[in-house]
Amino acid sequence: MAILKSSESGGAEGLLSTFNEKGLGEVMSSWIGTGENLPISSEQIQQVLGSDQVQQIAEKLGVSPDDASLSLAEMFPQIVDKLTPDGSLPTQDLLHQGLGMIADRLFGK
């Protein structure tokens, strides 16, 4: 799945690194930690994943890029939070499963 491109080489650490590079490391860290999850906007999702990845996700799921990024912004914090109940990063396999859950839960595919 296209959403995994930013994390394939580095697993969860790679994804966190991408968020850090885009100035959103604190946001993702809040999802990993055991406290309250900070929100992320659909624009920030596009910033982190890139418009090309969002477009690919949207095409694959049969929705508009705006709908895809909005839905990802709503679900991404919840999924990452559930994958990190003890406040630590998941293994790469668990991360892949969780990111696949995003598409399943958002779009029923």
Image (cartoon, rainbow, N blue to C red):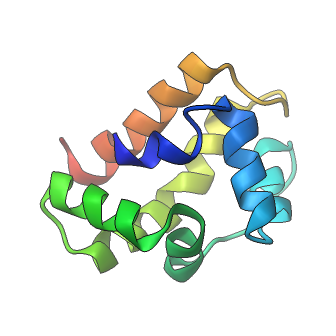
Q: Position of residue 55 (x, y in %)?
A: 29, 67
Residue 10 falls left or right of residue 45 = right
Q: Is residue 37 visible?
A: no
Location of residue 47 (image quadrant): bottom right
Q: Position of residue 92 (x, y in %)?
A: 61, 22
Q: Quadrant of the C terminus?
A: top left
Location of residue 59 (image quadrant): bottom left
Q: Nearer the viewer, residue 22 or 41?
A: 22
When the figure is inspected, residue 76 is found, relative to residue 15, above or below; the finding is below
Q: Nearer the viewer, residue 94 or 23?
A: 23
- Kindly identify the residue that appears in the image at 32 percent across and 79 percent down: 66
Q: Position of residue 25 (x, y in %)?
A: 82, 60
Residue 9 falls left or right of residue 14 = left
- Kindly identify the residue that appears in the image at 18 percent across and 52 percent down: 60
Q: Is residue 82 visible?
A: yes
Location of residue 28 (image quadrant): bottom right
- Kindly identify the residue that appears in the image at 32 percent across and 45 percent down: 103
Q: Quadrant of the N terminus?
A: top left
Number of marks present in the image shown? 0
Q: Nearer the viewer, residue 105 or 59?
A: 59
When the figure is inspected, residue 66 is found, relative to residue 68, above or below; the finding is below
When the figure is inspected, residue 32 is found, relative to residue 20, above or below; the finding is above
Q: Position of residue 7 (x, y in %)?
A: 59, 39
